[in-house]
């Protein structure tokens, strides 16, 4: 009986030592947290609740296009930004380049209806994902110089139309306004002439 108590005590002691080590080993890999296949699939299907579950409440997403920098702070702003991306047929293909501590750097290739129509898809960028306390704290997407140049050239090549044609109802409203003003002016002039000595 005494040997059984010693054995149980030894098993409990080992468990107390092994369980914390096992939990440490199960900590989320930053690269897996940022770019797991499940997260990418959830993003592409618009399941933002699943994706945002691994983002900090005060997370920041930054988009750098040359000198232009857009920042989205908090889950609501980030979700709205993502919804706009998906509405434009957005797809992304990240390839992890390095993991240093809690910082993951990836090459990101992206496609959208707009960039495909311009003939500049995929855009290539460097993406830096920073993880703190098991949550994504920030993600910064910086377009490559080559993709920025291609995008700029494609946009510059678009025809300059100076705006669309004026719709028919706008002409009717303009003619109506001129007629109304002319009628009021004639009426006032007529009244003024009648009152003149």
Image (cartoon, grey):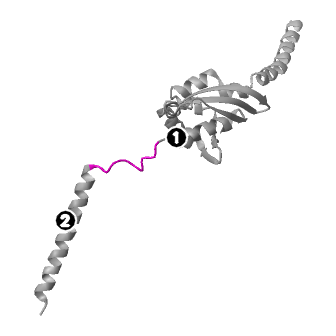
**Most frequent secondary structure within the magenta stretch:** loop
User: Can residue 53 be seen here?
Assistant: yes
Judge by depth and name the residue closer to the eye, 89 or 33: 89
Residue bearing the label numbered 1: 157
Residue bearing the label numbered 2: 179
Secondary structure, mark 2, is helix
The quadrant the C terminus occupies is bottom left
Q: In the rendered image of this protein, does residue 6 appear above or below residue 197?
A: above
The residue lying at 87 percent from left, 13 percent from top is 10
Find the magenta span and give its range: 159-167
- Work out whether mark 2 precedes mark 1 in sequence or the reverse, and give the earlier one: 1
Q: Are marks 2 and 1 in contact (CB under 8 Å)?
A: no
Secondary structure, mark 1, is loop
The image quarter in which residue 17 lies: top right
In the rendered image, residue 11, in percent from the top left (x then y), is placed at 84, 13
Q: In the rendered image of this protein, does residue 104 appear above or below residue 41?
A: below
The image quarter in which residue 38 lies: top right
The residue lying at 71 percent from left, 32 percent from top is 134
């Amino acid at each position: 009986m005494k040997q059984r108590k010693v054995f149980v005590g030894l098993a409990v002691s080992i468990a107390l030592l092994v369980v914390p080590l096992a939990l440490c080993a199960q900590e989320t890999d930053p690269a897996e947290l940022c770019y797991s296949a499940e997260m990418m699939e959830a993003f592409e299907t618009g399941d933002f609740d699943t994706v945002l579950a691994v983002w900090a409440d005060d997370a920041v997403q930054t988009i750098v296009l040359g000198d232009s920098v857009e920042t989205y702070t908090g889950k609501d702003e980030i979700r709205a930004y993502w919804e706009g991306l998906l509405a434009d047929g957005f797809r992304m293909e990240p390839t992890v380049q390095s993991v240093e501590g809690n910082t993951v750097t990836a090459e990101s290739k992206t496609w959208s209806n707009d960039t495909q129509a311009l003939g500049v898809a995929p855009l290539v960028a460097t993406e830096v994902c920073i993880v703190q306390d098991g949550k994504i704290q920030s993600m910064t997407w910086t377009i490559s110089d080559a993709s920025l140049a291609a995008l700029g050239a494609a946009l510059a090549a678009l025809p300059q139309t100076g705006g669309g044609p004026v719709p028919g109802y706008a002409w009717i409203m303009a003619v109506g306004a001129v007629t109304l003003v002319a009628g009021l002016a004639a009426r006032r002039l007529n009244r003024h002439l009648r009152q003149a000595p």
